[in-house]
Image: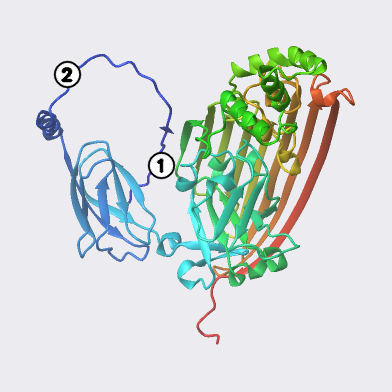
Amino acid sequence: MALKLKPYALAIMALVIMSLSPTRTLAHSESAELQSSVISTQQTIQIAGTVTDTHDQPLIGVRVQEVGTPNGTVTDVNGRFHLKVIPGASVEISYMGYKSRTLRVDRAQSDIQIHLEEDLLNLDELVVVGYATVKRSQLTGSVERVESDRINKETAAGLESRLQGKIPGLMITTGSGQPGSADISVRIRGTGSINGSNTPLYIMDGVMVEPAQFASLNPADVSNVQVLKDASATAIYGSRGANGVIVITTKRGKADRHGVTYNLKVGSSILSEPKSRMMTGPENILYQTYAVELSPNSKAFPLMRLLRLEKMAAQGALSPAEMQEWTAGKSRLEAARVTDTDFMGLMTQNGLTMEHNVSVYGGSERTQFFLSGGFLDQNGILKKSTLKRYSGRFNLDHKVSSFLDLGVTGSVGYTQNTFGDPDVGDARQAWWNPWFTSLLAYPYEDPEKWFNGDNPTLITKYFDRNKGLLRLLGSANLTLKFTDWLRFKTNFGLDYYGRKSVSILDREHPKASANKGFMSQIDSEMRRYTWTNTLNLYRISKHFS
């Protein structure tokens, strides 16, 4: 008889810190002997059966393996197999092009009848192109695919950053390493326009979504990403797909597979050593001394005048006015000679990243669901640059009848950013960018006493930049199956984001002397509705030419 399985799996991955007491370590041979003796003393039972397809034809070479062990066998020319396992073991039956099955065996059995169903996804990988799917072997366009296991190996907050270097022809550059920055350039096969946009079209679960706003969405919810690169692959999208198309598919529940997963990631961001070493305080003063020798009357650098007066005082060539100026500035030069400030070191830190993701999935043959939630807390290497993200997703698929399917997808994400430097634009080359001013600041200045707009420590002290972003994505679809080869699908989707950016310059900052500080707030919203109706013909009868 055929066994029907309802497996329930609980997979919990967590970071556990254990205190280990000193124990004796077994030698390799000693450990092997112990393991062998344990296995040999375990009670085993004999199971046997036949594996067939849906037409009751025996399958040859089907892999029958005890889960978690190398113990396994394959079926013979009649589809028969014999295997010894321990009571309560799970046995997986797998075959290329067919859906795998897992059975729990509690007693010896001699005639297990197992039927495997064809799995078209495994017979030939299906690729999403336009509003339908085709086999990769039948695909004429250029399409690349990245699965979730490769995406989740990365710790970057945004999905685009996790795709860097994984797809040929997909060029992703970031203008800022700041957590949550929207300054990301994505190009497929280079730049195609001088004046127009070069940004590809993004499709998530059949819904067109706004690019460069993925920091608020959780990459852990993504099942796979497919990149359509050439004209034949993107033609169905028309002019919108001229720059290529990125198709994102999120995770969904599967029939007769239930489980809970928890994942914790901890990482650190460390500033790499700069290619060029900056001058120390004494070295900078020596450099200005050389400048005085070349141009005695120049005031190109702050200490050149005092260094000139010092030299003239040693020669007894100061006028009364110059003597008074030298007396007033002598202490500043003395303090500069004993000061060596590393402004880059004061502005940076080792950034800690912590990400929590939990998901619940399951379902029956008729209804499948997937529910997830995530939290990300990331600190950048520049002080006062942080990202906090809260995200949630819900997917539900229900088979109403043999000809009607319903599906609902929804996700919400909220990010709160604190920026240490300007996110985008030319402002990065101005005084309010601490990266920029750290390279211009004089190392002989005391950061606590140097009240100047070029002091980068005053930027983090008196300048606040915050941005909040709420992102909502949702869709509902209905599929009518008229026949095995003709289907109609309608999908209605919503893409929404609301953004609020606030910048505040305190009146105490040197650059605020003219206007006594300022505050700016920018609010923006975007709503996009997509309604797609498709009629798919999956095959044509051989009787038609």
In front: 264, or 291? 291
Note whether 527 is above or below 132 in the view shown: above
In front: 268, or 459? 459
How far across and how far down the image is residue 193, in percent?
Answer: 70, 65
Is disc 2 placed on a helix, strand or loop? Answer: loop
Image-quadrant location for residue 347: top right
Note whether 274 is above or below 59 in the view shown: above
Q: Residue at x 70, y 21 (%)?
A: 312
Please name the amino acid that badge 2 sits on: Arg
Is disc 1 placed on a helix, strand or loop? Answer: loop
Total numbered labels placed on residues in the image? 2
Determine contact: label 1, label 2, CB under 8 Å. Answer: no
Note whether 63 is above or below 463 in the view shown: below
Note whether 432 is above or below 326 in the view shown: below
Where is mark 1, residue-wise? 6
Q: Residues within 10 Å of mark 2 (few under 14, many from 20)?
A: few
Q: Residue at x 20, y 17 (%)?
A: 23
> Tag 2 or tag 1, which sits nearer the N-term?
1
- Mark 1 → mark 2, Cα distance in angstroms: 42 Å
How far across and how far down the image is residue 21, in percent?
Answer: 26, 14
Q: Residue at x 80, y 26 (%)?
A: 504
Residue 264 appears in the rendering:
yes
Residue 435 appears in the rendering:
no
How far across and how far down the image is residue 536, in percent?
Answer: 61, 68
In front: 35, or 326? 326
Where is mark 2, residue-wise? 24
The C terminus appears in which quarter of the rendering? bottom right
Please name the amino acid that badge 1 sits on: Lys
Q: Residue furthest bottom?
A: 545
